Every structure is written in C-alpha cells, then in structure tokens.
Amino acid sequence: MSDHIVSSFAEDMQGLRTELFRMGHLVVDQIDSSVKALKSRDDQLANRVRLNDKQVDAINDDIEERVMSILALRHPYAVDLRETIAALKVARELERIGDLAKNCAMRVGVIIKDDKIKGTKKVVKMGKQVSANVAMAMKAYEDRDTDLALDVWFGDEAIDDYCNAVFETVMTGMMADNSNINGCTQMTFFAKNLERMGDHATRIASASHYVVTAESIREKRPKSDRTSTTRYLLEDDDEED
Amino acid sequence: MSSSPSIHASERALKRLKKRHARERRFKVMGLSAIAIAVMALIWLLYSVIGTGYKAFYTHSFTLDVEMTESVLDPTGARDPDALRKSNYRRIVQNAMYERFPDVTDRKAKKELFDIISTSGAPNHLRQMAYNDPSIIGQSFTITVPTSDDVDQLLKGNIDRDLDESRRKVSDRQIAWVDQLMETGEIKSGFNKGFFVNPDSRDAELAGIATAFLGSLMTLFVTALMAIPVGIGAAIWLDEFAPRNRFVDFIEININNLAAVPSIIFGVLGLAIFINFFGLPRSIPIVGGLVLGLRALPTVIIATRATLMAVPQSIRDGALSIGASHVQAVFHHKLPHAGPGILTGSIIAMAQALGETAPLLMIGMVAFLTEVPNSPTDPATVLPVQIYIWSSNAERAWVEKTSAAIMILLLVLILINGFAIWLRNRLEKRW
Amino acid sequence: MSQSKIKFSCRDVRVAYSGKEALHGIDIEIEDQGVTAFIGPSGCGKSSFLRVFNRMNDTIPGCKVTGIVKMDGEDIYAPTLDPVLLRARVGMVFQKPNPFPKSIYDNVAYGPRIHGLAANKAELDEIVESSLTKAGLWDEVKDRLKDGGTGLSGGQQQRLVIARTIAVSPEVILMDEPASALDPIATAKLEELIDELSKKFCIVIVTHSMAQAARISDRTAFFHMGNLIEYDQTSNIFTNPTDSRTQDYITGRIG
C-alpha cells in the first residue's frame, strides 16, 4: 500500500504500531516469566512479573492517548480507521492479558509452598501454548496475516482442552488428598487465567482479521468447551479480583 | 533561531536589494513624469482655450437715444408690415449717432463714427422692434445695442493702441470717441447673452451658438434613439442567443472593425443611404442623428457585450436552475445586473457622437444658418461643426468665439462623462 | 437499510465537452430517499455528472450528453421533454451562493412567480414564508424581507438559495459543493438543513470534503478520471471500500 500524502499522518500510524508491538512483546514476556516462575518455583521472578505489569499499563495509557489524538486530528477513514480502532482493542486485550499474568504470578507464591500439588507440568505446557498463541496473534496483526489469525482463533480449542485436563488432574489430586486444597485451588485459577489469556489472544486475532477484511471472525468461534457450568462459576469468582 | 547571519543579510544581498530599490525608484519617476507631461498638456490646452475664450462671455454695448422718424421709415404712413421691413433703419441709427456727436461733419469721420456701433445689429434690432410693434414709429427712446466687434476687441485690449493707425482696424478718432463714451457710461461691458441665444451670423458681435447647441441636442436625441436600443439588442443576441459558428464570428469581428473605421466613412455611408437613396433633406438633425447612430452602434455593442460578459455566470445559472427560460434568465437577471454598465457605455458612446464632426460635414450639416431650428427636420448644425466654421474666419473676434464654443463643448462632455461615472458608482453592485 | 424507490436510473451516460469525453459511460441508480454524495478528485467528472440530472449541461456551449437518464422511469433527454420544466422539478444549489441582486422576498418569490404557483399576493407570501422557514432562515430575515439578498452572510445566502429552490416545490435538489465557501458553523447549519430536507426531497450532493460526505450522506459514489469507481452505503465506503482507488483517495494516499 502506498503511503499517506501527509507524511506526519503516516508517522503517527507507524508510532502507534511500534508502541503496540512493544506492548505485545512485553506481555508475551510476562506470560513466559510467570509460567517460568511456576516451573522453577522462583518467587523472585514472580515478583518481577508483578512489578512489570505497571509498565504494561503505562504503554496501554500511551496507546489510548495516541488513538485519541489520531481520531481527533487525522480523521482516519477506511483501513486507517479500522487499524486505529483495532489498535485500541488490541491494547485493551494485551492489558487484560498482562493483568492475568500478574494474577498468575501472585498465585505462584502460594503454589510453590506445597510440593505435592499436581498439574504443574500440564500448566507449564499450557502456558507455553498460550504464550505462543498470543505471540502468533500479534504476528498476525503485525503482518496483516489473516491465515495466521485464523490459526490462532482455532488454536484456542487446544488451550481449552488443556484447561479441562488441568482441572481433571487437580480435582483428582484434591479428592485423593484434601490437605492442600488452597494450593490446588490456586493452581486451577492459574490454569483458568491462562485459558482466559487464550480467549484474549483470539480477540487480538479477530481484530487483526478485521483490520484487513473489515469482517469479524466471531461467528467461527470454536465451541469445544464442554464444562461450561464450571467455567461460568469460575468466571463469577474472577469478577471479584 | 540560528545565530549565524542570514543569507539575506549578506553584503551581496544588501547590494542587490539596493539595486532593486533603485530600479523601483526609477520606474516610479518615469511614471510620474509621464503623468506630469500629460497634466501639463492638459493645463496648456485649458489655459489657451479658457484664456482666450472667457472674453467671449462678456461684451460691450452702446446705449443710444434714437428717434424713429416717420418720414424716414414710413413716408406713406400706411404701416404696411412688408414695407416696414424694407425701411431704412440704418439711417435712423446713423442720425442718432450724428446727433450724439453733432460736431462730426466730415464724411469719412461720419462713416468711422457709425462703425463704432454694430452696423447690422443696431438697424436689425430696430427693424425687429418696429415689426413687433409698429406704433413705436415716430417715437423717441433709448436702445442698447452691441458695439462693433472691432470696438469690442479694442476695449478688451486685443487691439494695440500704440500701433501705427494704418496698421490697426480702429482709427485714432474712433479711439477718442469710444474712450469718451466709456467715460459717460454710454458704452458699458456686460454679460454676453447673445452668445447663447443668437444663431450664427456674419458679424462676430452678433454670432451665437444657439443653432449649434440645439442642433447638437436634437442630433444626439436621434442618435440615442437609434443606437442604444439597436446596440443593446444586438449585444444581447450575440452574447446569449447567437449560435456559435463562422458566420457569427465574422459578424463579431466586423463589429470590432467597424468601431475603428474612420468616422468620415460613416458620413459617406449616410450620404449614400439617407440622402441619395431615401431622399431625406440635407443638413437636418434626423439625418445627422442617424449617421452618428451608425457611428455609435459598434461602441454601444462592444460596451454592452463587455458588461454582459462581466455578469457572473452564477446569476444566470441560478435563474435557469429554478426553471426560468433562457429569455427570462437574460431579461430578468442578467440585463438588470448589467444595466449600470450598459448605461455608462451608452452615455460614453453618446459623448463620442457629440464630439463627432467629419461625418456631419458629408451630409451638409456644415451650412451657415441664421435661424434657430425648431424641430429635428429643420436645418441645423452642431457644436463641433460650429467650432470648425468659426475657426476658419479671419477676424480677431472669431478667435475668442471659437474658444468659447470649445469651452461649452468641453463642459457638456465633462458633464456627460461625470453623469456616467456618477451613475456607475451609484448603481453598480460588486459581486 | 430498506430498498427505496429509484429516482434516477442512468445507463452508459457519457458527457463530452467539444468532443473531449469527460465521463466514460456511467451506470448508476439514485434512490429517492436520503442523500447521495458524489466524491472524487478535482476533474473526475462528478460535477459534470450532477449537471446531467437537471440538464444544466445544455447551457454550456459544446457540451454533449449521451446515454439514457431516466427520472421516475421517464427519459429526461427525450426530445419532447422541456428542460425548463425539468429544472423546476430538479432544483440546484451552486458552489458559490448566487442570490439574485434583488430583495430577499423577491429572491424566493421569483420561482413561484414565473411558474404561476401563487394565485395572489397572500399565497405568494405564504410560499415565501414557508420556504424560508424550511430553509431555516425565516427567523433571521423576517424583519428585513425587503433588504437585498446579497447583503446576507455567506451561509445565509446559501440558505436563501435553498429557500429559492424549494419555493418551486422540486422533487430533487442537486447541490454542487454547497459548503465550500462557508465557515464551519455555517457549514454545520447547512448540513443540519440538508439532513432535514432529505426527509422531503431526494438530495444529490457533490462535495470535496470527505468528512462532509461521511456526515450527511446515506450513499456515496466515488468518481475517478471520468469513471464511477464505487457506489455503496456511505458507512461501507468510509470503513471498508472495496476498490483500492477509493481506499487510497479517502485515506489520503497517493493514488
């Protein structure tokens, strides 16, 4: 695509993009770090994740400001309008993912106190999948790659499956030994947070799909989650934090 | 801002700037001197015209006691108007003069004495009085009549008293009498009303511009009647309704050419058409007006077209867009809008026609007329032609008459142009 | 958006000036309801095309229109159709406000007078008042109807021209960049008026301001180099144009 006649407009758009990609990288790092903290039982790393979230929030605020000024001063139309709006959406999703990563990191401290809690391996695997999905969603956005965006969208099914598997494992463990219910609950929340990050990644993919095609892919949303009742209950809990 | 000196403050730049300013000043000086030359030429013209012409607006008159001796004028006592017309009023005036200066007996001196007074003006004045009222015959009364043009010139200082007697038109004796009469108040200077109300005359002291002035007005009236409606109509057709083709282009080019054709050609045309073909009489304002109408036509057409073309297209479009027909759009909107401009153009064309001489010479409006015209079908002449006729007369007195007539013509032209400017400023709307 | 009646239907419309073709075969259908906007770069032929609908091109020497233009199914270029009558049905507002150099009252009354729409003075007064009211100008000028129309401000003049147009009860109002000479507030008032008028009249507007087209029109047609590139709902054109030329134009890229 050729560039804008007004070069400062093109610069504004490029600045918005750069900032968003930086946020994407930071958030993916946050996911990776929180998962790594769980895996290596590293409370310090978990702490750093918690502190780094402020940085994510700051980038989000910056992006909101940039979007506002582009809308007010540049009056973007068509693809520019879609990209500006999408940037706002993606930043919001990333900010939510960042929050969830922080939330995960906070749970690490409780989980690592008890060696007997099962499911760590599965959660770490799941975490890697989620981090990969978020990174892919951002790449799809960066490259305007609709195929990749669709991959992310459909890839969410696997994450849901992981989540159900973690639930089953932890449940089984709890039923066998009810001395560590607190730690197990934290573990399920960890997994649930990861699952929700996956959902946010699909929304990022949807936004990048929208930038290119002006069409939502929501109607193609996979419905593989069969434990919807549990899901809703957990979501209700989530509202409180 | 950078602290280094701007390239516009460098020495070379300053030098260049100085040169540019010098060039500008030179140009201004040239423009001013051009205007100064033009103004000086104008002042010179006005000075020479007004300097000589103003003297024609006052004249000297002689107040004389006359006796309308019945034995001279009407020996039969029949008071027959025809006979009274042929009576010897000259003798009455002569007798009155001799009576005023009883010691003049010499025949030559008597003739010189009589020459002080307007030799045809005074008897004609008496004849007119007797014709109007025959009962004055036999009575004595006082008349005021013009002095002869030579005496008038002498008193206006146009005749050098120090010249040798043989080389001036007024004799030493006449000078002595005139000085005496001036002292007694019998010769007085006063406003020259005759210049405005008299027709042309062989005698300078009697000649006036009435014939020419009225002739000009009548001619102009006919010109306006012909040139303005036809010209405006033609311009509207050309501007709005004419098809775009070679024939119309040809017409347009020829209208422009016509404006540049020497005006005498129009005189030839008028002579051929109106006088030879239609058999109209010569010298009458109708024919003059028609000829000048032809002359003014291209000017009116060109001026009207220029104003019509200057009317914003948007006005016409606005009318058309709400369903006005083409003719309605033109006559309801375009024409009123162009009105002031058309009026100005027409008035200026009329002013031009007023100053036109050559074509009128061709159709005989150069005649010597001692009658004031009563209608456009009476022979007449016009101001510029009158100026032309007077300027070719030899006597000293005609010089100031010519200048005065020029002053009147210029005044009328200035009034007309001033009226046009006033009208334009008053009516014109800026868009 | 529900499909409304078709007001104009054009097939292969070409406009040529002295043999030089400016529009190369336009096919379009203009709906009766709402506002249709024509956008495109200068010289793209949008104004020429607008003038097809009231045959104003007829008044330009050397201009030739071919193709079929139907208004309510009737060919408006048929030899039996009188353009004078057509223009009473299809009014036009121009780029520069062009009130007549007459009083405000006479400006509005002129159309009804020449078309004989009022039987007497009272009726004419009523038409003038209602037209000025519809044009949102009545309250501003009711005390000075005898004053010259050219003494009004630019925005008021343009609304006076609209009042003059609606005084002859047209079915369609064509507008050729009506706000290009107006300040933002006058433009806003005009846009509000257009929105109001679109409930009663079919409005076709040519505009250079894409923001204006986006604000006031229901459908937008994009013209480029004498061709109709894209014609769609305005919201689609401004969020997701299908043609790359439209995209480049409305996003301000080198086309």
Image (cartoon, coloured by chain):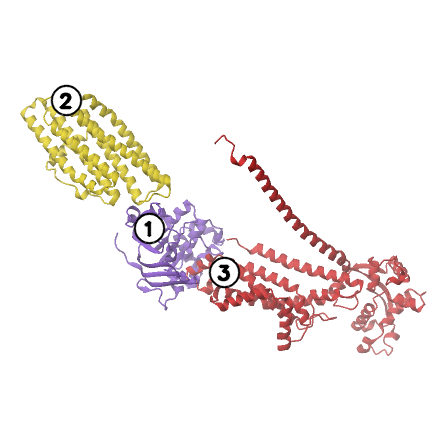
* Residue B70, x across and y down, in percent: 87, 74
Q: State the CA–CA distance, disc 3 to disc 1.
A: 34 Å
Dots 1, 2 in contact, CB < 8 A: no
Q: Amino acid under label 3?
A: Lys
Q: Name the residue under label 3.
A: B334
Q: Residue shown at 20%/34% (left/top)?
A: A134
Q: Amino acid under label 2?
A: Ile
Question: Which mark is in front, 2 or 3?
Answer: 2
User: Of the numbered discs in the image, which one, if any, rests on residue C217?
Assistant: 1
Q: How crowded is mark 3: few (under 14 residues within 10 Å), some or many (20 or more)?
A: many
Q: Which chain is purple?
A: C
Q: Amino acid under label 1?
A: Ser
Q: Chain A is drawn in which colour?
A: yellow
User: Of the numbered discs in the image, which one, if any, rests on residue A193?
Assistant: none
Which residue is more in the foreground, B320 or C116?
B320
Q: The red chain is which one?
A: B
* Residue C12, x across and y down, in percent: 32, 61
